[in-house]
Image (cartoon, rainbow, N blue to C red):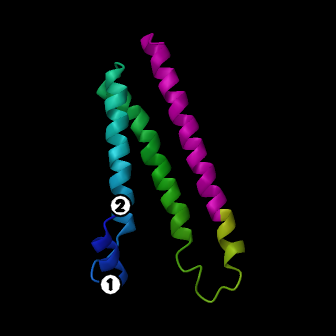
């Protein structure tokens, strides 16, 4: 991040939007995954099978994040409240990664790709 952008954000002139930044990175990763899977011979339908795993996981993760809304208001035990939700998010992320690997292996076997 440039010096001027950091300064602008610190002064409140430039609003920092983490959600937009995260969504942009996710989109870039999906495009990269699409290109990588295409390069090894996956069809658009097969790529969509893989990417749909990510979409479903993102929805479940968002449901968990929504549970955090308002948890910091008048809550003196915030860590105890948030810890199980963060653990569930981590579990969903790990499951997503495992499911993606399994789906790619399954499609490769189906296509006879090693």
Return the x and y of residue 98 as percentages of the image width and height: 58, 36
**If you read the primary sequence from the N terminus, does the residue marked by circle 1 or circle 2 appear first?**
1
Q: Nearer the viewer, residue 59 or 83?
A: 83
Q: What element carries label 2?
A: helix
Return the x and y of residue 26 as percentages of the image width and height: 38, 50
Q: Is residue 52 found left or right of 77 in the rendered image? A: left
Q: Is residue 55 found left or right of 68 in the rendered image? A: left
Q: Which of 75 and 33 is in front in this view?
A: 33
Q: Residues within 10 Å of mark 2 (few under 14, many from 20)?
A: few
Q: Say if the magenta span includes residue 97.
A: yes
The answer to whether 28 is drawn above or below residue 112 in the figure is: below
- As measured in the structure, the alpha-carbon distance from the residue carrying label 1 to the one carrying label 2 is 18 Å
The answer to whether 25 is drawn above or below residue 20 in the figure is: above
Region in magenta: 85-114
Q: Nearer the viewer, residue 15 or 40?
A: 15
Q: How many labels does the image show?
A: 2
Return the x and y of residue 77 as percentages of the image width and height: 71, 81
Q: What element carries label 1?
A: loop
For the stretch drawn in magenta, the main secondary structure is helix
* Extreme residue toward the front, this view: 3
Q: Say if the magenta span includes residue 64.
A: no
Circles 1, 2 touching at the beta carbon (< 8 Å): no
Q: Residue 64 carries which label?
A: none
Q: Residue 21 carries which label?
A: 2
* Extreme residue toward the bottom, this view: 74
Which of label 1 and label 2 is nearer to you? 1
Tag 1 residue: 12
The answer to whether 21 is drawn above or below residue 50 in the figure is: below
């Amino acid at each position: 991040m440039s010096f001027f952008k950091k300064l602008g954000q610190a002064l409140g002139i430039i609003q920092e939007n983490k959600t937009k930044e995260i969504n942009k990175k996710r989109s870039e990763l999906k495009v990269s995954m699409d290109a990588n899977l295409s390069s090894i011979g996956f069809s658009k339908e097969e790529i969509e099978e893989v990417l749909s795993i990510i979409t479903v996981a993102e929805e479940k993760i968002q449901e968990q994040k929504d549970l955090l809304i308002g948890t910091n208001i008048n809550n003196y035990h915030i860590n105890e409240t948030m810890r199980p939700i963060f653990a569930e998010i981590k579990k969903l992320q790990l499951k997503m990664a495992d499911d993606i690997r399994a789906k790619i292996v399954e499609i490769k076997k189906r296509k006879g790709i090693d």
